[in-house]
Every structure is written in structure tokens, then in C-alpha cells.
Image (cartoon, rainbow, N blue to C red):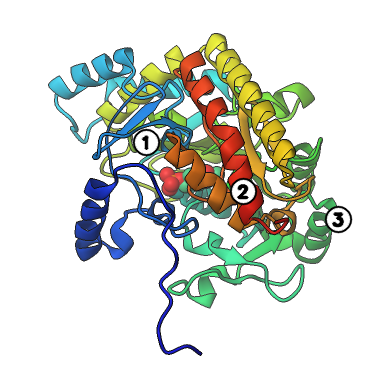
Amino acid sequence: MSSTPQTPAQPVTTLATQASADLFERARTVTPGGVNSPVRAFNAVGGTPRFIRSAKGAWLTDVDGNDYVDLICSWGPMLLGHAHPEVQAAVADAVARGTSYGTPTVPEVELAEEMVARTPVEKIRFVSSGTEATMSAIRLARGFTGRDVVVKFAGCYHGHVDALLASAGSGLATFAVPGTPGVPASSTELTLVLPYNDRQAVLDVFAEHGSRIACVITEAAAGNMGVVPPEPGFNQFLAQTCRENGALFVSDEVMTGFRASKEGQWGLDGKVEGWVPDLVTFGKVMGGGFPAAAFGGRADVMASLSPEGPVYQAGTLSGNPVATTAGLTTLRLATDEVYAHIGSAADVIKTAASEALTAAGVTHTVQSTGTMFSVFFCEGPVKDFADASRTDSAAYKAFFHSMLDSGVYLPPSAYEAWFLSSAHDDRAVQHVLDALPAAARAAAAAGQDA
Ligand SMILES: *Cc1c(COP(=O)(O)O)cnc(C)c1O
């Protein structure tokens, strides 16, 4: 080993980034890694994260004064773009009436009604993060069924719930091992992790552990390993298999809800095929950029929740009037036209990205569900986590930094969806298109194919 430690090469940038670099230094002094959620730190792509000072519509402005077309959209929530005037006005009104009372309020009832109207859930409980939503849904599923085992899929992310931060054990149908230090084995020993889209694996665990399985939880369409849609009929198969075995089917729509379509992923499969999940979790878009999330489902299952039933669950800021006002205003503005616009902007960007990568000779595949999509830097189709893991992260890293340098803020990880909003107009989309060819060439020069 060399005695001089190698510092990783910093990506070259032509933009001014000193103010971000200085803030990152300050942040690292007082916050682990300088960030409050790991992927913001650019660890997967190298370099210094940009500190954003303000945002408007499709654009972010950083503290050095650089503008970027935003393809993160706060990791999904900003369906209408940043600082939407009607959402801002509604929030300002709500703030003027006080920000939290710890009593029931009007907007939480209205938001619950709006969500019940659009989705298969009959009753809903608000929480403050997607993590809380999935944690509570699992507790409820266990309480309702009187069973203890939870089945999940590798590559599906459900927030940082102990029992769900698990990777597959040494074989299929064996109990999981913790995916991170700090999670005791006892927290994951009731979790079974299966390959996504694998029906036989599901049948096998039910054959072996059926009478102990409280629920199967899945992302309604996987979006946290890049976009990996369920194979046709897969969610219906899960719903049916759960019902036949007395388990609950928990569909995690924290990312896809009010994003993949007006009715989430369920609008693309369950509604068409005629089935409903027992429980659904929500977050991201429904909070309109504020910390709000929810879980809901069958009225008889939800009736087990306190204070109606025995399963305890609570939250000081749950259903917060400012957050629920932002969510309600956002959903009311999220019309068919909004989804049509996002869908066509996504089509233009998908096609152009694929053309640019093909022209540069970069192996890739584009996958989508509804208006959500991502670009994998590997051969397709990607149908599970093992496939997604083949992505060429060196190629993505070069692609990401070239795009960033051209004023396009992509997610700083190869395993993420690219998010658009109704504010991504022709100018913003054209800015992305103009940046793609150089980024594709950079990916070609850096990738495994090079
Ligand atoms: C983002 C996400 C979560 C976690 O939500 P947080 O608000 O970050 O806790 C859970 N499930 C899915 C599918 C998500 O995309």
C-alpha cells in the first residue's frame, strides 16, 4: 500500500462553487457528513453538494448564484414546481392563523377526504414522514392479524424503519440480517426479504411461513433502485396471495402516490385490474413540500388503530395545519392536465437522453411507470435489485457532473428516479436537452465501456 493517502479526484467544474464549499465545511463541523439526509452529500458521485438558496418553478438557484433545472424536485414532492403562487398563498394564510394547535383542524379533514376520493383507502391517519407511515402500517398489520412476520423486497426502500433496513439472509425464505449497524438482529429476524418481481419466491415463503405472515410490503412501483415497475399483474398477485393467506397487502405509495399518476401507481394497475390494497402509505407529493405523510386503507383494518382500536399510534405534529394546507392545495391543483404535461415532458427527456447515450455508445436502459422514469447505465430490462446493481456508477458519475456543470441538477446517485413538475416548461426541458450530448460523451469516456 502506498504511504501517501490518495485523495479522490474532485470533479472539475467551470461554475463558481466557493460559497457552497465554504458552507459544506461549516456544515460538516456541526452535522455528520454535512447533510441531514445521506444522499444529498454527493458521496456516490463525488464533489461538493450545492447549497440551494431559493427555487422558483423548475429552477434552483445556489448560494454562488448558479441556476439549475431541477430534476430532483425534493425527491418527488414538488409536483407543481417550486414556490407555486397558489400553494404559497394558502400556506401564508394558514401560517397567519397559527402554525400548530394540537387539536383537530379543518385542513386535515379536507386533505383526508381528497385522498380517500382519489385512492383505494377508506380511512386515513396522518403522520410526519414516510418512515413513520410504513412503520405504523406494519404495526397495524401485525396488530390486526395477530401475526409477526413481514415480507419485503430487496431494493425497495420504505424509510429508515429498523425492521425494514434489512437485506436478504443467506438464502431465500430465511430471515433477514440488519442492513446497517445500530439495528439489532432481533429487529430484522421477523423480516423476510425476497427478490422483486419474483412470484415463485413469494409462493415459497407463504408455503413455508404463511400462517405467521402479517403483511407483504412493497413499493407500489419500485423507485428507490431506479424505476423498476412491477411486472404486469405482480401487484395483483401479491394482493391475492395475501388475501388467500390471511395476510395484509401493504402498498407503499410514498413515492408513487399522486406522482406516477393522479391516483398513484394504483391508478395504473389496481384500478384497472379491479383490486385494492389493504393498506397504503403516502408521503412526498401529499405534503406539498412540507413534512406530511399518511397511511390508510380498509375501514375494518384502520378501526384497529387507537383511539378507535387497541393498536397505539400518535404524533404531536401529525396532520399539522400548515402542512396539510400545502398538501391539500397541491392535490387540488394536481389535475389531469398537470399529469399530462409532466408525462409529455418526461417523454421528451427520456427520448433525448436515450438518443444522446446511444450516439455516444453508452450502454443504458430507460424505465418508467406513469410519469416517473429513470435511466440505468446498464443493459435492460432491470427487473430487480440484482439487475439494478449492474449499473455503471463511474459512467453515471461523469454524466451527473457534466449535467450539473451545464446547469441541470440530477439526483446525485445512479439509483434514483428523475423527477419533473408541471413547471418544467419548454425552456427548462430544452436546457436539459442541450446538456445531454456532452454528458453522454463524458459518460462514454468514464464508463466500463470506455
Ligand atoms: C421516500 C420514501 C419513504 C420514506 O419517506 P421519508 O419521508 O423520507 O421518511 C418510504 N417509502 C418510499 C417508497 C419512499 O420513496
Could you tell me residue 107's position as x and y percent?
Answer: 32, 21
Question: At label 1, which amino acid type do we have?
Answer: Ala
Whether tag 1 and tag 2 are in contact, CB under 8 A, the answer is no
Q: Residue at the spot x=49%, y=58% of the render? A: 44
Describe the element under mark 3 as helix, strand or loop.
helix
CA gap, disc 3 and disc 1: 36 Å
Could you tell me residue 55's position as x and y percent?
Answer: 31, 28
Could you tell me residue 289's position as x and y percent?
Answer: 35, 31
Describe the element under mark 1 as helix, strand or loop.
loop
Front position in the image: 21 or 79 = 21
Describe the element under mark 2 as helix, strand or loop.
helix
- Residue pointed to by mark 2: 443
CA gap, disc 3 and disc 2: 37 Å
Question: At label 2, which amino acid type do we have?
Answer: Ala
- Residue pointed to by mark 3: 200
CA gap, disc 1 and disc 2: 37 Å
Q: Is residue 377 left or right of residue 316?
A: right
- Residue 438 can be seen in this image: yes
Q: Is mark 1 within 8 Å of ligand 1?
A: no
Question: At label 3, which amino acid type do we have?
Answer: Gln
- The answer to whether 59 is drawn above or below residue 190 in the figure is above
Quarter occupied by the C terminus: bottom right
Q: Residue at the spot x=27%, y=24% of the render? A: 105
Give residue 292's mark: 1
Q: Residue at the spot x=27%, y=40% of the render? A: 317
Residue situated furthest top in the rendering: 337
